[in-house]
Amino acid sequence: MKVSIIIPAYNEEKNIDKVLSVVTKVVEPQKIIVVNDGSTDNTLKVAQSYPVKVINLTNNQGKGGAMMAGVNYTNDDYVLFLDADLIGLTNEHIELLIKTVQDEYIDMVVGIFESGRKSTDLAQVVAPFLSGQRLIKKEHLYNIENLNTARFGVEVALTKYAHKNNLKVKEIVLKNLTHVMKEEKLGFTRGFAYRLKMYWEIAKKVTH
């Protein structure tokens, strides 16, 4: 089974190094694709300091557009999407995601945080369909309508497609893994406003 790792990144100069320092020890660098989604900070420079494929989008496309830019580049049958702001990522997390698909012949595996951090753990228990850590067969991604224009609702679109088409999906727990919250990145006021916008977009995806 051939797998590429795709990491969409927007203004993640402070976080992406922690992710790349792990994935480059597990997977061949040419199998790792970072998509810089029009960042205005040094995300591009940090990504280019690693021997990985970096796709630079000059304008921000949103998460779906960044993901599909990576999908269109790779020739591998499966893609593993990872967020660029993960905290606590290990070799074992990546190996578990890949091994689950290999051993159980499933269509998509979804990684769920379990870090002991109440704010992120609770969100994933209540709404596991929002997890960005997913390994899926690439061919399915071309069948999801408007995925390349999806922003906050991209994970919902993936989940709805899997349910509608009876894909075999498994959720697995990724212990001691979490991510940087929007309020930590942007400050409480901007971060909270961003979160409300995100939830509104997700709600529209869920109900349509």
Image (cartoon, helix red, strand yellow):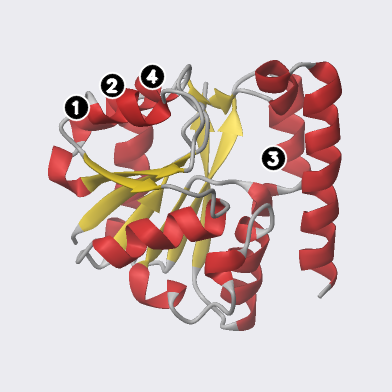
Front residue of 183 and 112: 183
Image quadrant assignment for residue 75:
bottom left
Camera-near label (3 vs 1) is: 1
N-terminal of the pair, mark 2 or mark 3, is 2
Query: Distance between the Cα atoms at labels 3 and 1?
Result: 27 Å
Circle 4 is placed at which residue position? 18
Circle 3 is placed at which residue position? 124
Mark 3, secondary structure of its residue: helix
Residue type marked 2: Ser
Residue type marked 3: Gln
Above or below residue 49? Residue 65 is below
Asked if disc 2 and disc 4 are in contact, CB closer than 8 Å, the reply is yes
Q: Position of residue 77 (x, y in %)?
A: 25, 68
Query: Distance between the Cα atoms at labels 2 and 4?
Result: 5 Å
Query: Distance between the Cα atoms at labels 2 and 3?
Result: 25 Å
Circle 2 is placed at which residue position? 21
Label of residue 25 in the image? 1
Residue type marked 1: Lys
Camera-near label (1 vs 4) is: 4
N-terminal of the pair, mark 3 or mark 1, is 1
